[in-house]
Amino acid sequence: MKRIGVFVCHCGINIAGTVDVERVAREAEKMPGVAFAMDYIYMCSEPGQSLVREKIKEEKLDAVIIAACSPNLHESTFRAAAEEAGLNPWQCEIANIREQCSWIHSDRKKATEKAIKIVGTIVGKTRLNESLEPISVSITKKALVIGGGIAGIQAALDIADSGYPVILVEKDSSIGGHMAQLSETFPTLDCSQCILTPKMVSAGKHPNITLMTYSEVEEVSGYVGNFKVKIRRKATSVDWSTCTGCGLCTEKCPAKVPSEFDRGLTTRGAIYVPFPQAVPNKPVIDRDNCIYYKTGKCRLCEKVCEIGAIDFDQKDLIIEEEIGAIITATGYETLPIADLPHYGAGEVPDVIDGLAFERILSASGPTTGEVRRPSDGMIPKEVVFVQCAGSRDPERFKPYCSKICCMYTTKHALLYKHRVHDGQPYVFYIDIRTGGKGYEEFYHNAEEEEGIVYLRGKVAKIFRDGDKTVVWGTDTLTGRNIEIAADLVVLATAIVPTESTADLANKLRIQTGPNGFLSEAHPKLRPVECINAGFFIAGVGQGPKDIPETVAQASGAACKVISLFSRDHLEQDPAVAWVDEDLCSGCRTCISVCPYDAREFDEEKEIVTVNEALCEGCGSCVAACSCGATQQRNLSDSQIKSMVTASLGGE
Amino acid sequence: MAKVAYYPGCALNERSSHLDRSARDATEKLGFELDELESWTCCGAVPPVSKERIMNLIAPSRILKDVRDSGRDMLITICDFCYNTLKRTNFSIRTDDIIRKRVNAFLADDTPTRTYLEEEKSPWQEYEGEVKVVHLMEYLRDELGYAVITEKLKRSLKGLKIAPYYGCVMLRPFDEIQLDNPENPTIMEDFVRALEAEPVKYPYRTECCGSYLSVSSPDASTRLCYRILSSAMKNGADAIVVSCPLCFYNLDSRQKVVLDAYPDFKTIPVFYFTQLLSLALGVGMDRQGFERHYVDVSSALEKIGNSGERDKA
Amino acid sequence: MYKKLGLDPPDNPPIRLDRTKVRGEFGLQVDELSGQHLFACYQCGNCSSGCPLAQEMDILPSRIIRLAQLGQKEEIIQSKTIWICASCFQCTVRCPKGIDIQAVMDTLRQIALDEGVDHFGPDQIDSKHAAEVPQPGLVGVYRKLST
């Protein structure tokens, strides 16, 4: 019989406050197979871990059980300790008596009984544990970055600079993302384009970066180090290999489509380049709005293109790539004003959102930086900025803080004031949040020196009255309601994940949170990784954040990828499914239940094998197997039986 | 005996003359004389805020200029209001060119009526804030040194627990006064220690007593005084020590009203710092003007009794 | 307007803000006379928290500053607060933005006095008080609270 050691942790008072840990240890000692048991205040501390190591040697233990917190927290800690003392790591098990016992119960007696049973089940399992060796898999050292905003660009550049090839996929025809739309950036007021374009150009020219714009990820299969990815290169209807980007076609196109880049403040043609600094600077035909595709007539662009680059018959291309790691940087959109009925539902012409105001402020924007309102081109003298338009409103809209609005609204008001000296900006806010280097000072300067009036209260209603836009707000600091007959109203609409985020997350099998943002593996300690190995995240797709934070996160994600690529092989948990070839009938039920495509039919042997690298050890196939051919390592039927018996109080 | 220019101000000249007398007695024992200015006017009690109200700066400026013109560079005051007004006026003249020019224009204008100029003893010279304005307690701390007081003690105040009350204008506004840390001052506690008594620290020692609201909103002042006095007592004080005539008035004579308003209240003696100083230096009880206090001081004096008397001469 | 309609004015009408009120005559006057900058205040409320006379006031000091920022002269000069402030400088030494709030209060009193709102005239003091109070109290009260 095995000699098992049981170590019961107090976790300060987290466990010992509810569970009689001494008694748990005493009872454990009586269990079959247990040769030694003890309790200690903090098992995970260095003295605690060295106790485990010493006792393994002293008591000649060949398996250990740590009765403590969730295995998510410290399984790897204790397995490493066990290995140091000469045990196979898979001979170390965790009995969770904190999350599953002490934290959720208050009756000390019953909780102690339950803790004893939990330890008993794990003893039952451990008695039959095999020693395992990790599975080794090779790595394809090539990264995929999805999303060509500043996050994607930064991550791609960092990985490419360290010598690994990167494919940068962007759904629009140019990289640059929202940052390309911005006028100036807080708190230093650098011109956004000036700091972004050099990076766009570098990404476009980098020998290690393959730019795939106007493209979308279609399908992802495989596992960390060995993904297979299908990318759809949408038909641009222009042969980019011959197109010189002269721009004649975009000038002559007779179609008028609201420009997405200018937030509908200007129009573009059906064949267009989204903005002059686009990378690559090549046009695409928007087939939904092209007169030729709609009516069969026009082809004006084809006539003016001297080199004959227009190709109306071009088809979408599916490209397959082998990839080792994937960074998702899908960015954001803003809540449409149409969704905010109390703020005019998008029907009041002089109520615009922050990105539209960025275009108005931008030197390359529709008014070349002169502040003019959309309805009649008048220079607005009374401008109201409304924060939390859809944010921090759990009942009606989004519960979260969009984080960047306090700062960009301050910037908007400041830039407006710099352009219209006799104008008055007002900012309605609930709280001003300026966590960030130089941010508080930026806000103070705006309030103190630039004459921006901050009014503390959420705006209730906005409506049009003649050529004025009336804002009903309040100022809780005076206790008085505030009414402003404004010339222009700018809403800081809530930041939301891009529409395609959910669909893409499904394809990648990575998780999203309740508000649709991509989920990180741990909010503090693993902020750029997904739970699934080989997937990383960066930028606003993970949650609202500003440019410095986005760039830092992107570099962090890139660094994780580079660290992954620095190894030649990966080790994976061997506690996965295996097949007793003699028992397998080849019914293939397991293939249909496997969520990871890890079960493959072997035509020759007529059995179903397990791709150990793909298997996550979820146990679905084990449960589904009707002839008992599929078993899970260290969770065999006999182990489960032994655990059930122990949990029912038997031995 | 050394002489230092001294500006008593209105209150010390009349309604708070016991503050003035005990100060003169004490300093004499310490070996210097408070040399009262030959002629002086009211300083105005509260310095103006606006540059528009330049007139309010003229009286204090003239006092300071007279000191400078008499060839002295330091002026002692005792009343906190006078100290605040003179010191801040000086600060404005030193730091603000416009104020300095405007004030001097007025001073120049009224010079023909001044006798010393008629005699042409002293040629006209712009006042630039040359005089250093010091509070008597500041003088004791920085110029004389508290150790000298302890050396010259005739009667130790050992056994007496004294709660210093700072009030407002002795410490604030700090940028202009710079006497001590406005949130955690020690000048009075150290003074109490120099007399070998035990200072009592309590949270209300720098909270306002109501100042001139005593006249316009007496109830507000009563509430404030009650909070200050009971805070001191709660922390074990036998007596309160102050330096300002208005603080003294509010904390001492207002106890009459406090007693009526708050049934739980018990009275506590209030002293001027100069009274304690002169007592400790051996000046007689009869010269302290204790009969002018509303609250009988004997409960506190009994604590030191005669056992404190000693001969150090 | 309300009188003409035969109605009582509302108790809490909205402030109809525009450029002329925010940086109107009143705000500029306060800034100039006090030598302070009203818009430096970011409404942390420290002045109110530590004001020994807050309990006697109808409007807290921080709110007085706020009303001044928004040009609400009438509400300020009709308030009790400006006359209750004892000029103790507690707010001034504590203001994290370095605003001399006491100077603003003095200025507001001055503006109110200039408008003929005489708070405390010599006839309002009782003779017993007048005979007892040390001179700084008398000089202070008339300098601060009456024309």
Image (cartoon, coloured by chain):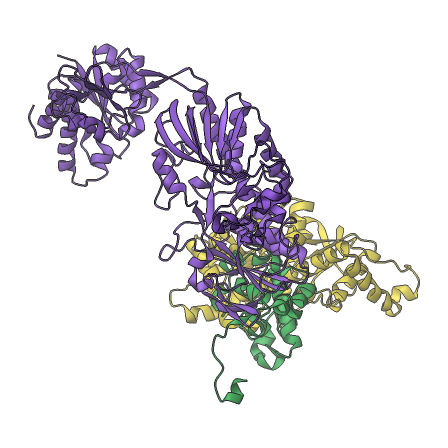
Chain colours: A purple, B yellow, C green
For the N terminus of chain A, which image quadrant?
A: top left
Query: Where is residue A301 drawn, in percent x and y?
Result: 59, 44
**Is residue B61 or residue A600 the one in the foreground?**
A600
Q: Nearer the viewer, residue C117 or B194?
A: C117
Side of B35 relative to A509 (left or right): right
Q: Is residue B254 visible?
A: no
Residue with the most extreme left position:
A650
Is any atom of residue B5 visible in this view?
yes
Residue A242 image point, x, y percent: 60, 32
Q: Is residue A63 above or below residue B127?
A: above
**Residue A297 drawn above or below residue C83:** above
**Along the line of sight, the residue nearer the viewer: A356 or B149:** A356
The image position of residue B289, as x and y in percent, is 59, 64
Please identify the residue farthest to the front as the structure is shown.
A297
Please identify the residue farthest to the right as the structure is shown: B120
Q: Position of residue A579 (x, y in %)?
A: 19, 18
- Tag count in the figure? 0
Quadrant containing the C terminus of chain A in the rendered view? top left
Say which residue appears at 58% left-offset and 64% top-offset.
A375
The answer to whether residue B208 is above or below residue A211 is below
Work out whether residue B19 or residue B286 is closer to the camera in this orientation and state it.
Answer: B19
Q: Quadrant of residue C147?
A: bottom right
Q: Residue at x 58, y 57 (%)?
A: C41
